[in-house]
Amino acid sequence: MLKLKPNCECCNKALLPTSTDAMICSYECTFCKTCVEKVLLNVCPNCGGGFSPRPIRPKLARREGVSLKHQPASKNKVHTPYSIEEIKLFAKAHCAISAADR
C-alpha cells in the first residue's frame, strides 16, 4: 500500500493525504505537480521514470478496515538527495525520451 508521503521531495510543500497536487513515480517518489512540471520536466530525479497523480485513500471505511483511519499516511518527510542544479541537468538530459521508453 502507498505510504502517502507528507511532502514534496523537492520544495518541501505539504502534501496532505487528500491532495490532488501530489504526483508519484513507480517507486513512490513524491513531488508536487508544480515541481514535476517546471523543475523535473516529468523526470523523477531518483529513478528517471515519469509521474502519475497520487491516488487518494478513502477517509471513510466503505469496506471494513480499509480507510485513511486504518492505514494512515506517513508522517516522515523525505527530501531528494540531489541539488536543484543536479535535478535540472538530469531532467534536461532525459525529458525528450517518453516516460514509457526511459
Image (cartoon, rainbow, N blue to C red):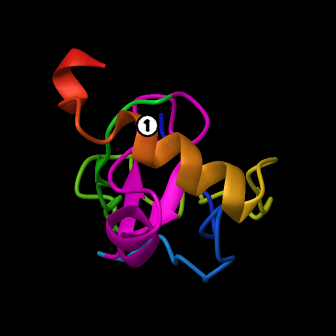
Decide: few, some or many residues near mark 1? Use Cα within 10 Å; few <14, some 14-19, many ≥20: few
Q: Is residue 23 magenta?
A: yes
34 above or below 37? below
**What's the residue at 50%, 62% (across, down)?**
31
Quadrant assignment for the C terminus: top left
The span shown in magenta is 21-47
Q: Is residue 99 found inside the magenta-colored segment of the image?
A: no
Q: Residue at x 38, y 34 (%)?
A: 94
Is residue 78 shown above or below 16? above
Identify the residue at image location x=77%, y=49%.
Answer: 82
Q: How many numbered marks, from 0 up? A: 1
In this rendered view, identify the residue nearer to me: 56 or 33.
33
Percent position of residue 1, x then y: 47, 34
State the image quarter where residue 49 is shown: top left
What residue sits 35% from the left and 56% below the top? 41
Instruction: Return the x and y of residue 13 as percentages of the image width and height.
Output: 61, 82
Residue receiving disc 1: 93
Q: Amino acid at mark 1?
A: Ala
